[in-house]
């Protein structure tokens, strides 16, 4: 089992920056991909960025060039650096990881979510 603990989000002015972090803990064999999703009221949760264990990354078109996902495998932590924030980035951001437990069973895990509000 894994637990994901996200850093606090916050209120940011348009054009500003914010970095989110998410640390995974638990008795795990390996963490595979890690990702950030976001959700606004009445909409489905959408993938923002994903990073695989080897370092390959994927970004949603809406955040390309503005957001950067990274991970520290030694700390089981994933980061999301968000620059040039726009009001449309306002959402609850969720951390996700897929991980194998000691029996090599692969499961998905979610963080509790953190609110990011972009507003002047």
Image: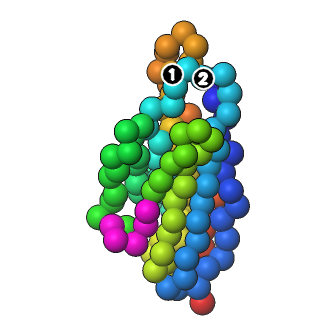
**Whole-percent x and y of residue 21?**
61, 55
**Residue at position x 58%, y 66% in the image:** 19
Q: Residues within 10 Å of mark 2 (few under 14, many from 20)?
A: some
Q: Counting residues from the N terminus, which is met first, the one under dot 1 or under dot 2?
A: 2
Q: Is residue 88 visible?
A: yes
- In screen coordinates, is 1 left or right of 72? right
41 up-or-down from 44: above or below: below
Quadrant for the C terminus, please: bottom right
Q: Which mark is residue 28?
A: 2
Q: Main secondary structure of the magenta part?
A: loop
65 inside magenta stretch? yes
Nearer to us in this view, 61 or 73:
73
Nearer to us in this view, 40 or 19:
19
Q: Residue furthest front?
A: 74
Nearer to us in this view, 113 or 30:
30
Q: Residue furthest left?
A: 61
Report the number of numbered marks: 2
Q: Residue furthest bottom?
A: 120
20 up-or-down from 98: above or below: below
Quadrant for the N terminus, please: top right
**Whole-percent x and y of residue 84?**
46, 80
What's the magenta region? 64-68
Nearer to us in this view, 74 or 99:
74
**Whole-percent x and y of residue 52?**
39, 40
8 up-or-down from 104: above or below: below
Q: Which mark is residue 100?
A: 1
Whether tag 1 and tag 2 are in contact, CB under 8 A, the answer is yes
């Amino acid at each position: 089992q894994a637990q994901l603990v996200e850093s606090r989000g916050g209120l940011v002015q348009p054009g500003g920056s914010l970095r989110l972090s998410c640390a995974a803990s638990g008795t795990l064999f390996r963490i595979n991909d890690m990702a950030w999703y976001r959700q606004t009221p009445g909409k489905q949760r959408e993938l923002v960025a994903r990073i695989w264990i080897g370092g390959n990354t994927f970004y949603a078109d809406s955040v390309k060039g503005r957001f950067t996902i990274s991970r520290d495998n030694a700390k089981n932590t994933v980061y999301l650096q968000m620059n040039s924030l726009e009001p449309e980035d306002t959402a609850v951001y969720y951390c996700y990881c897929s991980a194998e437990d000691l029996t090599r069973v692969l499961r998905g895990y979610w963080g509790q979510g953190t609110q990011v509000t972009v507003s002047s």
